[in-house]
Amino acid sequence: MRICYYRSYQAIYKIISTFLPWRYPSLLEGEGSLDELPAIIKDKQVDCLLIVTDQGIISAGLLYPFVEQVKSLSIDVCIYDKTVPNPTIQNIEEALELYHSNRCIGIVAFGGGSSIDCAKGVAARVARPDKRISEMRGQLKVKKKTPLLFAVPTTSGTGSEATLAAVISHTETQEKYAVNDPVLIPDYAVLDPLLTIKLPAHITAATGMDALTHAVEAYIGRSNTEETKQCSLQSVNLIFNHLPTAYSDGLNKESRKSMQKASYLAGVAFTRAYVGYVHAIAHTLSAFYGVPHGQANAIILPHVLEYYGSSVYKPLAELAEAAEICASEESDKEKAVKFIRSIKELNAAMNIPDKVSDIKEEDIPLMVERAHKEANPLYPVPKILLKDDLTRLYHLIKE
């Protein structure tokens, strides 16, 4: 009965989603494209801007040339730079106070997915001052116009510059959850590969596998469309062809550019087609132990794909073809097995572990409960997994 309910819920939500006000961010792409953004902000009559970023961006010196360009156009700027990995409600409330006290009317998210998610949280709170973040958890709880939001990703993985989701951590309850609403899709996104040139190899690896997980989970799910399928296929092709080079040669601009595009395409795919159990489990690992989200996805992905078994042979075979890692005469099962093996090999080549050492046995029941609640009934996964299945998966990834 539960499985029937889950599938019915997903089918109804897929129908409803066709009527939602989907949109895409206006893209600025290519080397130096960030230089185009200040004039656009000025043209939009934004005279005071909140920039949401983190200390890593400040230390790397990536932000200040942009700030000086913005200020030269007589636009006031205030900077919130305390965003942490897996941004918290406290981050959002602190940035919101800065937004209001400086009378800002636009927001720039400058950094990785955490900074973009934090900025989306601020935008949601500006739009709905009557609601706390926890009250906007889940689907379509914002529903009102947000401030102009400009996303400048400095990593290539989350795809948050294209999505409707802000993923927030609640430190007191050790929860990590999403606020999902099309109004949170950024108005503009800047894909400037020069911003990712200095990205450390381990972050390149984790974020790249995050993008791959988005593309794969969107593709194998039951709510994909022709558009999301094409985006996923293109993303997988780009990742398999360019992530190894981006990891080993961070100065390679072509690979950096391709990984930014792959991340964006995967974001477009999963914001419409959703993700699955990989993400549900990964969110608990980040919330409980601070495991970086991309690394958690990378570790979990091959285990979940193997657990799905024959239900994903055909879509994984198609992804293997897109990745150019199989022969045409091979069976779907052979291609699927090769695709999963290639994910493991890619992880190993980039020094991503195959287990999570922090998992405590006593935490597993609560993590199972939360992963199950996140995934079911919302995620249109290829095969419904129940709590016993999730428990087995936690033990498979436990070192």
Image (cartoon, rainbow, N blue to C red):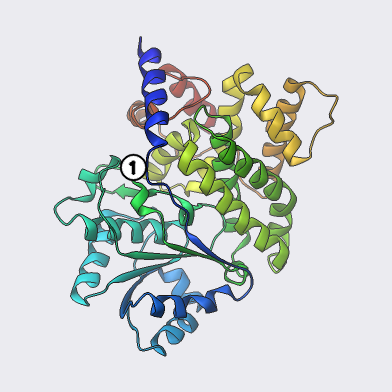
Badge 1, how many Cα within 10 Å: few under 14, some, many 20+? many
Q: Nearer the viewer, residue 245 or 270?
A: 270
Q: Quadrant of the N terminus?
A: top left
Of residues 141 and 82, the one drawn nearer to the viewer in this rendering: 141
x and y percentages locating residue 275 in the rendered image: 48, 36
Q: Secondary structure at mark 1?
A: strand
Residue 171 lies left or right of residue 158; in this view the side is left
Q: In terms of depth relative to the viewer, which is nearer, 55 or 264?
A: 264
Q: Mark 1 is on which residue type?
A: Tyr
- From the top left corner, tell me how far across and down residue 304 is, in percent: 55, 28
* Picture coordinates of residue 75, whole percent (x, y): 34, 84
The picture quadrant where one finds residue 122 is bottom left
Work out whether 139 lies above or below 191.
above
Residue at position x 71%, y 28% in the image: 317
Quadrant position of residue 92: bottom left
Which residue occupies the foreground of this view, 220 or 94? 220
| Above or below, 241 relative to 2 | below
Residue 112 visible in this rendered orientation of the protein: yes
- The mark tally for this picture is 1
324 left or right of 55? right
Going 67% across and 38% down the picture, which residue do you hit? Answer: 343
Residue 361 in sight from this viewpoint: no
Residue drawn 46% across the image and 27% down it = 380
Q: Which residue is drawn at the image coordinates 71% and 60% (left, top)?
A: 255
Residue wearing tag 1: 177
Q: Is residue 266 above or below residue 331?
A: below
Estimate the x, y position of residue 246 in percent, counting from the top left.
69, 59
